[in-house]
Image (cartoon, rainbow, N blue to C red):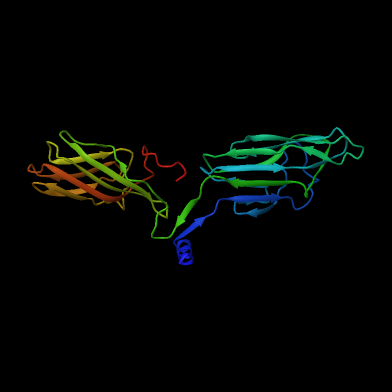
Amino acid sequence: MAGISSSFSRDLVNWTPKEYAYITLSVNQVAGVAITNPVRFDTMVGNMTFDPTTYRITLKANKTYRLKASIVGVYSGINGYSYFELHSVTAGGRVGTIAHVRSVTTAAADKSNYSDVFLIVTPAVDTVIDIRLNAVSLLTTIYRDYSHWEIQEIDTFAPSRAKWQHEYVSPLLDLTCGGPAGWVTTRAVGVFYKTSNGAWKLNFNIVGAAGINTDFSVTVTGVTFKNVANNYQAISVGSVGGFITYNYATPNSSVVRCTYNANVTSIRVSGDVELDAKPTGYDIPSDV
């Protein structure tokens, strides 16, 4: 029975793995070993966006990554050294620590001791990174066999659900609402969710005492209702006393609206409507 349950769970949820990369050089680097030149890491094992012709990796926005690289060089003299940096091509500057690699004082002058470049970062936008020389003296070769670059996404999994599921579903949240004169909110709750294709929706229920007017226009803070093919989105409205004449979620705004006659004393509004974008002000995780 346990085996059936495990198989069933795997079928229902297709977990998208974290990004990772292990990158090396295919040959010793003997050209392009001057200041600002990139280390020619060109061979990747992993699942990240990588360009082996420019030796650059792409970090995706709002994901957290750990980057570490070790580099070993060969020098033409015992006073040789080199400094390497993680360089943001997108921002145009160094990020993370600088690695200091220097010649060991031996007659052969063919070994290095070294430190690593290191960075933990959560970029706000997609960011292109390479490793390049920050300073250099007497460097002749970057060793293929001893140099490597590691990148690992270290934040939590983001599940890619089956088609009938959602990428994100919030808990039941209190909605912040404002209404017309005389309106008193009795209950306003909703669930925000993100569909598997990235669209945001709100499933809501709002109850309150009718205002002194016959035009119910309640504003839901932090949302904008989508204009769906130049049409209003339908909502459901019930009332105590009287009757409702029409009702909808107003496109390109945050207003749910209906009209009613003077005999109505209480209104109940519910709906499952599309939003223009991710809602604000409701503590929804930043990486969703």
Q: Position of residue 44 (x, y in %)?
A: 67, 53
Q: Is residue 232 left or right of residue 98?
A: left
- Foreground: 68 or 38? 68
Q: Position of residue 51 (x, y in %)?
A: 64, 50
- Foreground: 18 or 37? 18
Residue at figure coordinates x 39%, y 57% from the top left: 165
Residue at figure coordinates x 60%, y 54% from the top left: 47
Does residue 232 show up?
A: no
Quadrant in which the N terminus is drawn: bottom left
Does residue 180 show up?
A: yes
- Foreground: 126 or 22? 22
Q: Is residue 114 left or right of residue 128?
A: right
Quarter of image, res 163: bottom left
Quarter of image, res 260: top left
Q: Is residue 110 left or right of residue 243?
A: right
Q: Position of residue 204 (x, y in %)?
A: 27, 47
Give above or below for 166 relative to 225.
below
Give above or below for 44 relative to 280.
below
Q: Residue furthest right?
A: 107
Q: Is residue 126 left or right of residue 282?
A: right
Q: Position of residue 19 (x, y in %)?
A: 57, 50
